[in-house]
């Protein structure tokens, strides 16, 4: 596409991670034309850029996208680079139309179609699927700027390994899965403090033999996938807490962190004399702070009235107020599993079926309108002919 020109697409999928690729698979199964765009230069880069030691929380048997198994022992936990390679090979295997290096900077609507722009490029689409998690923009508290400039500050999205930090103590701000995993790793080389509200934890070791049954069947496929959903009372009660505070610890537990020397402290609420200030009034003399306090959704580029406090408003991924707009991959979109690899397939399939039905309805409406016009023209012509015959034949 040449600079400044528009490209017309029936369905535009924004994001080529596991959500976008699952979306592409199901759109292809429905025989629907589509294009997937992604800001990264390679499929899977969003995984490659995470910390070096990261492993998935789900076993390989649950890390496959529809139609292609994950190439690893079923009960192993893949590395982030293995996941990135899998996504890249998945797109190639199914010949999914993915255009990388294309960051959408604005999504709006004009003349009944969606308009997505990427620099001087413009895409017009009947349907748009935002296939991205709502973890796009790192969240750091305002008081971070008041810390002593000698303190190394890094957000979990930029953390790779302990070599990025100075010698001395580390404060991990945030006690969710990322904070616990990074804190456990740093405890081998640094004294680690961890602040933040507890998020709960699984009561067993996910690497143990019992977990092969408990984790996959009971927790990930059962509780996370079928029990904690927007359709169940317990899921509706749990959703605000999980979205606001994060899900339970999966690989680590408080006892493991304590044995590793990770010291739990109260919440970090500000600074005093350039040092982190805790809720109990103490300050910590640390040389590093790792912010693991979450993300903003990062959807400010969506120039449509579908966001409430930055969060997308939808019904299981379908934006009823903007027909043709969809979300897949959001945290707790339908279930707690919606943000996990094994959970995106169900959500993507539902959206693809909705797009197919919408296409059929629009075509049927178009055919009905054409038919009505033809019938109207036929009646007019008949009436005109009858009038002529009446005039020439008394």
Image (cartoon, rainbow, N blue to C red):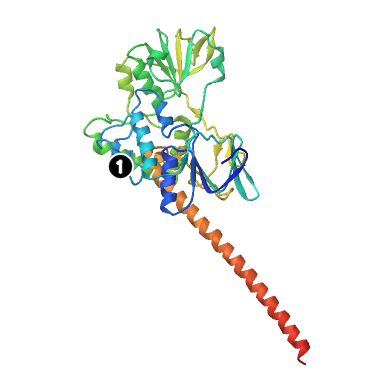
> Mark 1: few, some, or many residues within 10 Å (few <14, many ≥20)?
some
In this rendering, would 385 be left or right of 327? right
Q: Where is residue 236 in the image (x, y as percent from the top left)?
A: 45, 42
Residue drawn at point x = 52 percent, y = 56 percent: 359
For the residue pair 233 and 207, the one nearer the viewer reads as 207
Q: Position of residue 382 (x, y in %)?
A: 68, 80
Confirm whether residue 94 shows in the render: yes
Residue drawn at point x = 37 percent, y = 32 percent: 84
Q: What element carries label 1?
A: loop
In this rendering, would 38 be left or right of 78? right
Residue found farthest to the left: 209
Residue drawn at point x = 34 percent, y = 15 percent: 187
- What quarter of the picture does the C terminus occupy? bottom right
Q: In which quarter of the image is residue 108?
A: top right
Against 246, residue 318 (above or below) is below
Confirm whether residue 201 shows in the render: no
- What quarter of the picture does the N terminus occupy? top right
Q: Where is residue 89 in the image (x, y as percent from the top left)?
A: 36, 38
Q: Quadrant of residue 377?
A: bottom right
Residue found farthest to the front: 2
Count of number-bearing discs: 1
Q: Where is residue 43 in the image (x, y as percent from the top left)?
A: 42, 35
Q: Disc 1 marks which residue? A: 69
In this rendering, would 110 be left or right of 12? right
């Amino acid at each position: 596409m040449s600079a400044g020109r528009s490209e017309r697409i029936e369905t535009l999928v924004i994001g080529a991670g596991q959500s976008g690729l699952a979306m592409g698979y199901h759109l292809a199964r429905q025989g629907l034309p589509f294009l997937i765009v992604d800001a990264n230069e390679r499929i899977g880069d969003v995984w490659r850029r995470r910390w070096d030691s990261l492993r998935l929380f789900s076993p390989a048997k649950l890390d496959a996208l529809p139609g292609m198994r994950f190439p690893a022992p079923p009960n192993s936990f893949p590395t982030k680079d293995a996941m990135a390679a899998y996504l890249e090979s998945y797109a190639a295997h199914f010949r999914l139309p993915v255009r990388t290096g294309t960051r959408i900077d604005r999504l709006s609507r004009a003349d009944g179609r969606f308009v997505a722009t990427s620099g001087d490029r413009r895409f017009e689409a009947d349907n748009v699927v935002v296939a991205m998690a709502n973890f796009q923009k790192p969240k750091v508290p305002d008081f971070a700027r008041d810390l002593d400039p000698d303190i190394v500050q890094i957000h979990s999205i930029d953390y790779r390994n302990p070599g990025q930090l100075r010698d001395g103590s580390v404060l991990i701000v945030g006690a969710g899965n990322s904070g616990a995993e990074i804190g456990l790793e740093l405890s081998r080389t640094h004294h680690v403090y961890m602040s933040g509200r507890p998020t709960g934890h699984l009561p067993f070791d996910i690497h143990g033999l019992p977990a092969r049954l408990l984790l996959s069947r009971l927790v990930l496929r059962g509780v996370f996938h079928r029990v904690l959903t927007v359709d169940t009372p317990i899921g509706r009660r749990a959703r605000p807490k999980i979205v606001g505070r994060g899900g339970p610890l999966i690989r680590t537990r408080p006892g493991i962190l304590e044995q590793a020397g990770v010291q739990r402290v109260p919440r970090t609420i500000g600074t005093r004399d350039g040092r982190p200030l805790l809720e109990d009034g103490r300050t910590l003399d640390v040389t590093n702070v790792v912010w693991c306090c979450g993300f903003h959704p990062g959807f400010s580029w969506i120039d449509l009235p579908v966001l409430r406090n930055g969060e997308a408003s939808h019904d299981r991924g379908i934006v009823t107020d903007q027909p043709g707009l969809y979300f897949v991959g959001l945290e707790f979109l339908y279930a707690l599993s919606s943000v996990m690899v094994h959970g995106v397939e169900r959500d993507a399939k539902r959206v693809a079926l909705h797009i197919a039905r919408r296409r059929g309805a629009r075509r049927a409406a178009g055919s009905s309108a054409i038919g009505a016009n033809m019938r109207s023209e036929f009646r007019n012509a008949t009436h005109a002919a009858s009038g002529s015959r009446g005039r020439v034949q008394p």
